[in-house]
Structure formats: C-alpha cells, structure tokens
Amino acid sequence: MNEQQRKEMSQIIQGDAADRKSGQDKPLKEKTSEDFAKYFETTYEPPNLNKARKRGRDEINVHYNFQIPEDIKNIGNGKKFLIRTYGCQMNEHDTEVMAGILTEMGYESTSDTKEADIILLNTCAIRENAENKVFGEIGHLKPLKLEKPDLILGVCGCMSQEESVVNRIMQKHQHVDLIFGTHNIHRLPQLIKESMFSKEANVVEVWSKEGDIIENLPKVRHGKIKAWVNIMYGCDKFCTYCIVPMTRGKERSRRPKDIIQEVRHLAAQGYKEITLLGQNVNAYGKDFGDITYGLGDLMNDIHKIDIPRVRFTTSHPRDFDDRLIEVLAQGGNLLDHIHLPVQSGSSEVLKRMNRKYTRESYLELVSKIRKAMPNATLTTDIIVGFPNETEEQFEETLSLVEEVGFESAYTFIYSPREGTPAARKKDDVPMEVKKQRLYRLNDLVNKQSAEAMKAYKDKVVKVLVEGESKNNPDVLAGYTERNKLVNFKGPKSSIGQIVDVKITEAKTWSLDGIMVENTVEVNHNG
Ligand code: 5AD
Ligand code: SF4
C-alpha cells in the first residue's frame, strides 16, 4: 500500500470522510418522500453483486488503527442499543463487534425494543426464508419507529450487500434509517452520527469490494465460557448455489500472530472453549504471499495454548489436507468432532454445485480421517432439491449419509439466490418432491443420531457446563467434546467447568445424566 492509499484508508477508518460529508451537527429532521426521492436519484450508490463477485490481485490490507473519533465517542451516553442477529456464527460474532463499538460510544444494551434508541438487524442472505424473517421484523418495527422518530433503525449483515434488498427497503420500508454492509462495520460510529444529524432520507453505505482486515475492533462477547475467534473472512469457492462469496468478499486470512494473541488472551481470561471461524477455514493461509502456513500449522500452534477446547468451522472437503488431519489426530484440546459439509452424495450434482470434489473423493477423505481419528464424530450440511436433482441422485445422498454414518446434519431445501449461477437454471423438481426428500433425509439423520446417542448410555462423558437448561432451571446443560448436548443434575458451582457426567438416558438429540464425584478440570496436555 502506498502512502496515499494509507492516508485514504486511515481517513476511512477514522471517519474523516463521513465527517466532511455530514458537516455541522444538524437537528434531527423528519424525512419526507421528496427527501427520499432526491437522495435516491442523486447520492445513493447501490450495492452491486457483479462487482462483489470480481476477485482482483490486490494485496490484502490489514489495519490496526481503528479508533472512534473524539466527537462521536460519547454520542450514546444515556442511550440503549439492541441488535437482532440472524444466520451463522460469523454474524453472531459480528454482532459482538458491533456491541463492542456501541459500548465504547456510551450505549448500553437492552433486550426491550421499546427501550432501545438504536435497533440493528444483522441479517442473513443464505436462504429466502431467512430474508423473509427480516422483512417481517422490519414491518413489525414500523409502529415503534412512528411512535419514536428519534429511534435509529438499521439493517446490516449479508442482506444489505444485495442490491434488490436495498432497493426494496428504500422503496417500501422508508422507516429504516441506516443500511450498511459486511465490509464497513468499523464505520458504525460515523454512520450513526450521520444518521442522527444528516438531512438524507436514509444513510446507505455498502461497499461491494473484496474486503480488508480490521484488527483492533472492540468486542463485547456473548458469554464468559465459549468464544468465537475469526481466523479468516470471505470465500473464493463460488459454489453455484451460494451468495456468500458475493456478500462476504474474497478469502483473506488474519495473520497467525494476531489470532494466537487473541486466543492467549481468551485463555488468560478463563474461557474454556474457542471456535475458530471462517466461511472456508481450510483455505486459511492460502492468501499469504510471504509465508507458508495453513490451518494445520495454526491448529498445531493453538494446540500448545492452555485452553481446554478448540473447535473450528466451517470446513470444505476440497481443502482439508493431510497436515490438518495429522495435527487433529494429536487430540488434547483439539476435539474429536469434524463438521464437514458434503451438500450432496451425487458426483453429478456436486459438479453442478461446483463443489470441486466427488462422492468418491469425499469418502476417501472420510476414511483418512477415520483412520487417524477413530473416535471422531462427523456431522454435515446437505441441500436437497438442487435444480434438476433426480430421484437416483437424491438416493445417492441417502446412501452416503448411511455410509459415512453422520451423527447429525443441517439439512436444507435448495433456495435460489438472485445473482448466483444456479438461480438462472431451469428446475424441473416440484416443491412437493423437494419437501418429501427433506422429510426422508431427516428421518434417516434422526435415526442415525438416535443410534449414536444410544452408545453413550451408562458411559461417563466430559461436559463443559454452560448454565441452566433452557426448559428446567433445576437441570444444568452443556456439551461433550463431540458436541452432544447433555442435561444433567449437578451443583450450580460447576457452571463454567468441565465435569464428568454419567449418562442415564439417551434421546434423539440430547443425553440426560448425573454429575459424578471426583470431577477434575481436564488439562488438555495431561
Ligand atoms: N439454498 C439452500 N441451502 C443453502 N446453503 C447455502 N446456500 C444455500 C442455498 N442457496 C446451505 C449449505 C451451507 C449452509 C451454511 O447453508 O448447506 O453449507
Ligand atoms: Fe458458500 Fe461454498 Fe463458500 Fe461455503 S464454501 S460459503 S457453501 S461458496
């Protein structure tokens, strides 16, 4: 990056650009349709999925100089924020970052919409029903906004990266004040200021770009026991059904030293479990020009840190290499659970999905993993009803599920996403057939899950105790190393600890048990 670019980026991060644009603080002004129409014709620059699809060769810029400008720092004093999160763990973690930024601006969190001065909807674009939920919520919030015009209602996350969504909000939901995308979360302070004082009808800032890495963003983590750690952003796989490569930018990895420092810090704070996050974690490090360092190397380094449990998600079978398997086989804090989305059991469908592996190569990978980690639990994601999927191709999915012995699976009916190649295909599979396939698949997955659970009866498992069970405060709940939910009787003092639990009953999706004496905190190196 040259000096000029550095200066520009620093202005962007520190918000000089927005400050210049919004000028002097102006009193909040009621928005009219004319305001909106004028803004729409003049200032508004829509997001662009085509632009977002492009991958350049530019170096990835890592920024360490995030700061909230002095004049915005206390803008939230005495005010409250609420963030609703939809979708994946990446979004949940982005919410923790936005909560961190808002807290530094003086805002306090609330779970009551009526109390909130700012409400953000952190949205998911992966399937149509996720988008429908968000539009439903935008509608529900309209009376509140009319009652309380000073309320800032914002939409962010993956949906805001889509031109069609932004246009729909601008035209039909003019009570939304603020729209920003996944690449400019760090601009939240400036955007809020603009929204408070600007004359514009809406503040819209969505960047259809490949993305940078902003390192030192504040975070308010959701809990004190488990934590998310981003290791990379974006996706370059371009599966033909998936909108993510357009909404999240190109694959870019955080530097190992930054990740390791974050994990050490979490260990020192007493966190018991971390989950390393990325859309395609196995591509970690492939974008480093200067060092050869992949996910296996990172896991090997994290293996040495004194944090009891380390998980990672989401894997792509194509990039899952031998080095990673060898490192995972060491065990210790690297757990015996691999989530390995297969999507379909038919090589022909996988080809049309652009998954870049076949049924056979997936099974080969599974057998390599099983050989190195005989006790590993495998789980997966599956899409049924991809355009023109035949009955035989679907049956290949069923047989693969049996052959691998997945213990659970997230299963979905294919949902066409505008701007993706699969959405342009004609599809001869009726929705009723797709639904039937989903039921059949779920029946099989449930059966396999129940079978796997039965094997735990009368066994003692290690459970990281997360708190009281959702349905019964007299019962505690937590997860085993292989990610099985356990509800059990035990003292509240064990919350946050890893304890031994004897399983008394196996259900389809969870286990019941009793905590046993002599519980010791596990030392992963021991
Ligand atoms: N329709 C249905 N499911 C999808 N997924 C991703 N895109 C779509 C789509 N267009 C599923 C995949 C992925 C999971 C996160 O969501 O199975 O692994
Ligand atoms: Fe989407 Fe495929 Fe990337 Fe996963 S690997 S985020 S399914 S494009």
Image (cartoon, helix red, strand yellow):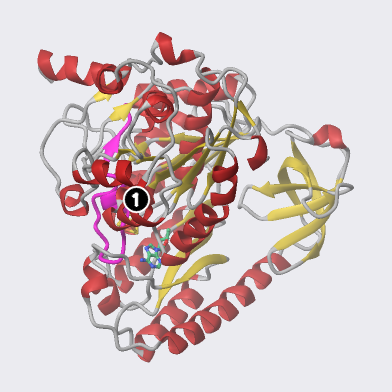
Instruction: Residue 238: say if magenta.
Output: yes
Report the number of discs: 1
Q: Quadrant of ligand 2?
A: bottom left
**Where does the C terminus fall, quadrant-wise?**
top right
At horizontal 34% and vertical 44% (from top left) the residue drawn is: 323
Q: Give the amino acid at mark 1.
A: Met
Location of residue 201 in the rendering, given as x and y in whole percent from the top left corner: 35, 39
Asked whether 357 or 111 is in front, the reply is: 111
The quarter of the displayed image where residue 361 is located: bottom left
Read off the residue under disc 1. Answer: 170
Q: Please rate how many residues cluster around mark 1, counting C-alpha atoms within 10 Å: few if below 14, some from 14 to 19, many from 20.
A: many
Q: Nearer the viewer, residue 213 or 524?
A: 213
Is label 1 in a helix, a strand or a loop? helix
Asked if the magenta segment contains residue 257, the reply would be no
Position of 481 with respect to 219 (left or right) is right
Q: Position of residue 374 (x, y in %)?
A: 53, 57
Extent of the magenta region: 234-255
Classify 179 as above or below 17. below
Residue 281 visible in the shown view:
yes
Residue 328: image location, x then y, percent: 46, 44
Up the image or down, 250 lies above or below 223; here it is below
Q: Quadrant of residue 445?
A: bottom right
Residue in the foreground of this view, choosing between 240 and 31: 31
Q: Quadrant of residue 257?
A: top left
- Mainly helix, strand or loop, the magenta region? loop
